[in-house]
Amino acid sequence: MLIALPNEIPLSNPIVAFTVLLAAILVVPPLFERLRLPGLVGLLLAGVVLGQSGLKILNPETDTVRLLSEIGKLYLMFVAGLEIDLTQFRKTKNRSIGFGSLTFLVPMLAGIGVGQLFGFGWNASVLIGSLLASHTLLAYPIVSRLGVVNNEAVTVTIGATIFTDTLALLVLAVCVGIHGGGFNAISLLTLLLGLAIYAAVLLFGLNWAGHSFFRRSGDNEGNQFLFILVALFVASVGAEVVGVERIVGAFLAGLAVNNVLGHSPTREKIEFVGSVLFIPCFFIDMGLLIDIPAFVRTLSSFGLTAAIVMGLIGSKLLAALLAKVFYRYSLNESLTMWSLSMPQVAATLAATLVAYQSFNPAGERLIPETVLNSVIVLMLVTSILGPILTTRFASQLPLPNLSLPDADTPDETAMLWWEGQNCNPLEHPHRPFTAIVPIYNPQTQRNLLEMAALLARHFSGQIVPLAIAPAHVHMDAPELELSLAHSQELLLEAETIGKEYDVPVQPKIRIDEAIALGISRASREEQANLIIMGWSPTMGFRAGFRARLFGTIVDSVFWSAHCPVAVARLLSPPSTLRRVLVPIDGLTQPSIRTIQFAQVFAKTNQAEVTILHILPHHAAIAQIERFEQHLSSFMTQCYPASTCQVKVVVDDQIATAIVQESQGFDLMVLHTVRHRTAAGLEVSNITSQLIQESHCSFILWGERG
């Protein structure tokens, strides 16, 4: 029997539309990033090419595209609320509100002026003003890479985001309500009162419900993920019930669960799903809405587009200069604030689309297509110009004060500094030293056990080789019997290594349904001082798509363990590692503890330690000399008998410089930070690059931050 095949693929088929969207999301952004253009620009252009002005493959009116775009719009605003650093906002609350008011009101007035100049009504003019008033921290990774995130001007700008985005969405809600008709003073008061009550209930209620649910759900990330998604869409629907746009509810939901998620594995998965699927669909849909002839006419008239773009750039600059006067910032600081607050992406595009799709009873849009096209041009210009200017101005900011705290400084940092010379990260006053070594790979376990034995011998402690057998429903299952027999073989070899180093060995087998949790639970039961794990590309962090979605063993152990964790890639026996390099990013608490661990390890086999710090070229010579002097002074006071060296190198390419310096060393000790709520290691791009490119052994040393 023959099966008839269709002559052509129906483009209206939802599966076909979804497949085309996925293909565009997969292929287009990397191509544009290679051209040093934002990936979202490529998604917009992909929408234009695939839409009715191009190949007519996708139709923005189909149910599939509309659903994915609507979810993407909500997801975009949810993530915008989620990424606001509430801790930073609290640190500089007053100045953040002050600058937030300036960078909201000045562009707002500029936008109203543009609207009135081009003949728009007051409601549309105010709406245009609100579109210019918010900002997206597109250049945050740049200031983070340059090490100036803690500069007050940068912190204030970051904190101002919550103020500008909230007010911009509030203005949007009012303007959409007025445009819908039947709106008067009583309606306005009712809307504002309802929104205030709803926001309070959502922010406090969802925060409480989230904390309660996460406590009860334990480690069930699937249920936590679903809870957050339900919270997002319930908050969006609730906002519509109150009488405001759904994106307002999505933004408030992001703020509400901000502290609940912290930097947990669930948050990573939520942001990952949004960034690879729903949010790109929203940007493609924005491109589908662009009518090329109308877009060309908008650009040919030029006046409105130029007024909106120049009005935004000029008003944001004026707000930053006013902040310079009020708060006595330097010119570079104020220009950095300007460049950081310039990009208009998340809230601006979402609000623009809402306003464009808002009709009054007569069928008129709140803003015409010319404004939509002008805002898209604004987004393209500011998303490219903002990061470029941030790179230029932020690189001129002074680096954080890296000097030694004074001995009489009463703060916690100074106390830690001066008392730290008598503090060992591996010692505990009430229990003997115990190192847990999970064993699962016969090819790497010997080096790990030798490292543990060296440390245990130094502290007169013991090592606990740990084998995890996957749990089965039936304890007499053949698979479990085989796993236990294999574990016994590994443990026998571990005992032999312990005898070679004359160190007590307490082998342990644990049956557990989860390897990572089994390691953490066993280490707690044994009151371990240290967990030593082997590094493997398939076990380590960011090992690919599956790792980002489901996490890794190393991630999970770092997240749940009660004691320090050392993840090691040892290319040769530990006793042969004579030259140890410790790159540090400053005299910070994690760096000091990493140096202490490296010193302990060096004592076990008479190795030499070199402390390496990389400073950018714009650092002053006096600053470089001062840092090197203070670091040498610290090492002399804390480790007078050690053979530790200090080296400061000037280079803008930090990772490349460290890789080059590491060529003459046997081992690198890299510090990481793990938080109780974090997804394992907080590993910078620099550390990731070092792991990929270095050819020597390394240890990732992490303690709870």
Image: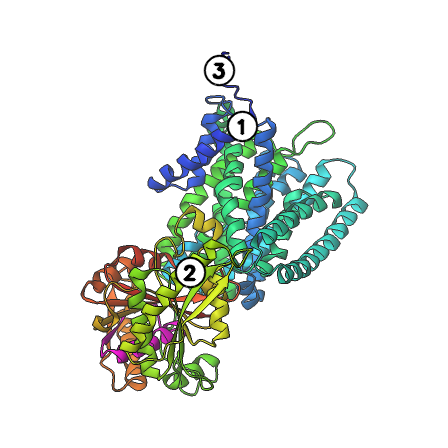
| Numbered mark located on residue 467 in the image | none
Look at label 2 and name its amino acid: Val
Q: x and y percent of residue 397 in the render?
A: 37, 63
Circle 3 or circle 2, nearest the eye: 2
Badge 3: residue crowd in 10 Å (few <14, some 14–19, many ≥20): few
Whole-Å distance between the Cαs marked 1 and 3?
14 Å
Question: Badge 2 is on which residue?
Answer: 554
Q: What residue is shown at x 67% (from left), y 62% (from top)?
A: 212
Of callouts 3 and 2, which one flags the residue occurring earlier in the amino acid sequence?
Answer: 3
Residue 673, can we see it? yes
Label 2: state its secondary structure: helix
Badge 2: residue crowd in 10 Å (few <14, some 14–19, many ≥20): many
Q: x and y percent of residue 514 in the render?
A: 50, 59
Residue 487 location, quadrant: bottom left
Q: x and y percent of residue 76 in the render?
A: 55, 45
Identity of the residue furthest to the right in this view? 186
Of callouts 1 and 2, which one flags the residue occurring earlier in the amino acid sequence?
Answer: 1
Whole-Å distance between the Cαs marked 1 and 2?
37 Å
| Residue 311 in magenta stretch | no
| Numbered mark located on residue 15 in the image | 1
Q: What residue is shown at x 69% (from left), y 60% (from top)?
A: 204
Q: Toward the viewer: 388 or 70?
A: 70
Look at label 3 and name its amino acid: Glu
Label 3: state its secondary structure: loop
The magenta-colored residue range is 585-612
